[in-house]
């Protein structure tokens, strides 16, 4: 399988398993930010470099290199390529051992507690001299080391095959041409690429001093087809800086594009111009790796420096402006300070002008022309704004930045950020007046209370904001609000109004919230529904206190419109349970008839008066005579019924005696015949 096909397979695996979106690009932090560390490490020398002439590092020896991360946070996968040839002009003194890539003992060890998928594993010798390893977690790995993002990623064993100097570097570009390498992705939920501070390795097994390789390039922000000047004259061999060639005898430039390498000496290759190419006839843009390798007098002791040059595909002209003012509320005649910042947000050095005015008037607060801004540069201009002869109300300070000068005009790529506006208020200095009305004026617990602040006024115009404090930790906003209080008591209700100028006014009122008095009659019933005159009926009344305080009240029971009985000073605590009380009704002197029982609670402060009365079942009061006649009839019936039963019993006994006599006679005849 080709390297390009393997790359596509890996990224498809990452996209599926990690949920990365192709359109989601994470911008790298600025250089110098506190980034996690990705480094090539030697467990043999406990260093990021191996510069030793010991036997282990001479031809025939072997050594191991680890790739470690530190403080990366939750991780989910990596794709890292090591390049161990300093230049393709000469072979490295080391080769990756066959089948020497290993995840053992690391964060992605398949034998550990997490499910690991090896997405790619390859070793490429001459002429690429690269090893590449890629692995991901299948699902979420809950191991502490994976969550912290500190530990070993993988290790490689190398065979020493010569005596020379080389580097073992983590590639920052590729495998897609002119693209940054996706080194590692974070854990859930966003799975974003992780930016690292990378530390590479130098391997040298020969004695001697290494030269210093360094170069600069200009312009700092090149564009497609630009000629980029690469300057290596800052390189030197220690102790020979004063020589014309600074001790540098040989220079090799490589560009990781379609261009051939450039080789020469300090004079012929110390400063070169280069255009980045995608092909022999097509210019390239994107991230381009430029490598400089320099030699002193010993060809076995080279040193390299690599920088990533970003070539922009287009020129972007974009100037932006922002404004801040020191005071947002001033009296007429007072001043406020305006701080205006303009910046170059594009990738081309630009010339700009700036106008600052009040309410877009012809009279400018300030004007600046011929402002030169390099890429990413910002400049600040401060102005004093006098609120002279301005009306009471809101006024705008407007800052406008324009590209070009009096003779040329440049089209800004983003006109929306060419204008910035800050507002200030010219005020009378008089605070607004807060007023509000409460309805009802004496509410009970749970009742909807209306607070109306529409009578508040502001001499500078109108009220801009209302803030309520009801004294029960429920702040609110608005000119008209409704609120319920959950407990009885006296509350200090405070209204703060804010005018257009930012000045505030306050008003407080005390509001007494009454407890709810609510005793409800649940049931009324007697223990007898037919009773003779002069009899007794026990009337049972069920009561419930649905309020939130204990109540003392009187209870009266009625038969029809007449009082059957009264119970005074009943004490009933609040609660959902029904309590039962009994009042005895003596029917002596009551006119016979049918009467409906009812009950009434007398509680003047009861909030729900409609449940203080309740009608129950009916009771019939019978006259005494009707009861006596009925009793005589009942006795006569019982007596007659008893006589009938007795006669029936005698007849049954006589029948049994007759049957027995017949059987004896029949038995006797049978015996005589025998």
Image (cartoon, rainbow, N blue to C red):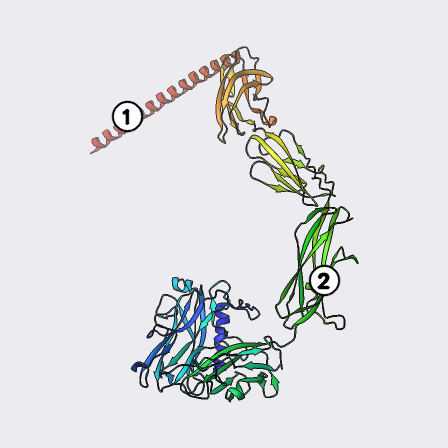
Does 341 sit left or right of 408 as displayed?
Answer: left
Q: Is residue 388 above or below residue 646?
A: below
Look at the numbered disc 2 and give the secondary structure of its residue.
strand
Determine whether the residue tagged by mark 1 lies in a helix, strand or loop.
helix
CA–CA distance in space, label 1 to label 2 = 143 Å
- Mark 2 lies on residue: 400
Residue 624 x/y as whole percent: 52, 12
Badge 1: few (under 14), some or many (20 or more) residues near its Cα, within 10 Å? few
The one of 11 and 653 positioned closer to us in this rendering: 11
Q: Position of residue 581 (x, y in %)?
A: 48, 22
Q: Which mark is residue 661?
A: 1
Image coordinates of residue 105 in percent, x first then y, are 34, 70
Please name whichever residue, 529 or 435, is drawn nearer the observer in this view of the structure. Answer: 435
Residue 669 sits above or below residue 228 on the image: above
The C terminus: image quadrant: top left
Residue 503 sits in quarter: top right
Q: Residue at x 44, y 87 (%)?
A: 127
The tag earlier along the polypeptide, 1 or 2, is 2
């Amino acid at each position: 399988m080709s390297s390009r096909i393997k790359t596509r397979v890996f990224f498809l695996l990452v996209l599926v398993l990690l949920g990365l979106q192709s359109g989601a690009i994470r911008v790298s932090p600025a250089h110098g930010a506190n980034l996690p560390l990705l480094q090539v490490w030697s467990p043999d020398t406990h260093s990021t470099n191996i510069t030793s002439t010991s036997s282990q590092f001479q031809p025939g020896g072997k050594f191991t290199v680890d790739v470690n991360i530190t403080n990366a946070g939750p991780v989910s996968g990596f794709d890292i390529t090591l390049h161990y040839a300093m230049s393709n002009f000469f072979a490295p003194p080391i080769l990756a051992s066959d089948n020497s890539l290993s995840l053992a003992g690391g964060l992605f060890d398949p034998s550990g507690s997490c499910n690991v998928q090896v997405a790619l594993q390859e070793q490429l010798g001459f002429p690429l001299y690269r090893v590449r390893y890629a692995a991901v977690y299948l699902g979420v790995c809950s191991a502490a080391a994976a969550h912290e993002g500190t530990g070993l990623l993988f290790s490689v064993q190398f065979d020493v095959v010569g005596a020379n100097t080389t580097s073992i570097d983590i590639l920052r570009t590729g495998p897609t041409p002119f693209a940054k390498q996706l080194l590692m992705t974070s854990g859930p939920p966003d799975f974003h690429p992780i930016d690292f501070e990378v530390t590479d390795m130098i391997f040298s097994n020969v004695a001697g001093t290494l030269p210093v390789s360094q170069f600069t390039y200009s312009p700092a922000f090149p564009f497609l087809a630009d000629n980029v000047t690469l300057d290596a004259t800052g390189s030197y061999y220690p102790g020979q800086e004063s020589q014309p060639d600074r001790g540098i005898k040989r220079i090799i430039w490589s560009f990781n594009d379609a261009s051939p390498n450039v080789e020469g000496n300090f004079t012929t290759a110390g400063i070169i111009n280069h255009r980045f190419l995608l092909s022999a006839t097509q210019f390239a843009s994107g991230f381009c790796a430029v490598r400089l390798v320099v030699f002193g007098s010993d060809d076995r002791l080279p040193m390299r420096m690599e920088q990533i040059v970003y070539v922009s595909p287009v020129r972007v002209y974009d100037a932006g402006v922002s404004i801040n003012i020191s005071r947002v509320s001033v009296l007429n005649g007072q001043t406020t300070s305006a701080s205006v910042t303009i910046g170059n947000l594009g990738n081309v050095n630009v010339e700009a002008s700036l106008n600052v005015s009040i309410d877009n008037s012809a009279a400018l607060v300030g004007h600046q022309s011929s402002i030169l801004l390099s890429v990413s540069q910002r400049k600040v201009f401060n102005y004093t704004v006098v609120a002279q002869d301005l009306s009471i109300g809101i006024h705008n300070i407007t800052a406008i930045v324009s590209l070009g000068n009096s003779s040329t005009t440049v089209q800004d790529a983003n006109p929306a950020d060419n204008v910035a506006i800050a507002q200030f208020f010219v005020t009378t200095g008089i605070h607004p007046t807060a007023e509000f009305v409460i309805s009802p004026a004496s509410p009970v617990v749970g009742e909807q209370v209306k607070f109306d602040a529409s009578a508040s006024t502001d001499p500078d115009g109108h009220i801009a904001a209302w803030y309520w404090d009801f004294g029960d930790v429920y702040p609110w906003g608005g000119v008209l609000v409704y609120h319920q209080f959950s407990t009885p008591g006296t509350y200090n209700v405070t209204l703060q109004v804010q005018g257009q100028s930012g000045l505030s006014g306050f008003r407080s009122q005390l509001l007494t919230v009454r407890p709810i008095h609510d005793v409800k009659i649940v049931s009324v019933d007697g223990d007898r529904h037919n009773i003779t005159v002069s009899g007794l009926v026990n009337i049972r009344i069920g009561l419930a206190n649905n309020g939130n305080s204990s109540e003392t009240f009187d209870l009266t029971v009625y038969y029809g419109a007449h009082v059957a009985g009264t119970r005074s000073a009943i004490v009933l605590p609040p609660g959902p349970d029904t309590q039962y009380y009994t009042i005895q009704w003596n029917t002596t002197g009551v006119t016979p008839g049918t009467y409906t029982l009812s009950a009434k609670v007398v509680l003047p402060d009861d909030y729900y008066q409609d449940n203080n009365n309740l009608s129950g079942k009916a009771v019939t009061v019978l006259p005494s005579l009707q009861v006596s006649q009925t009793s005589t009839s009942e006795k006569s019936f019982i007596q007659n019924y008893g006589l009938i039963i007795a006669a029936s019993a005698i007849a049954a006994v006589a029948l049994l005696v007759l049957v027995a006599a017949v059987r004896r006679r029949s038995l006797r005849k049978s015996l005589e015949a025998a």
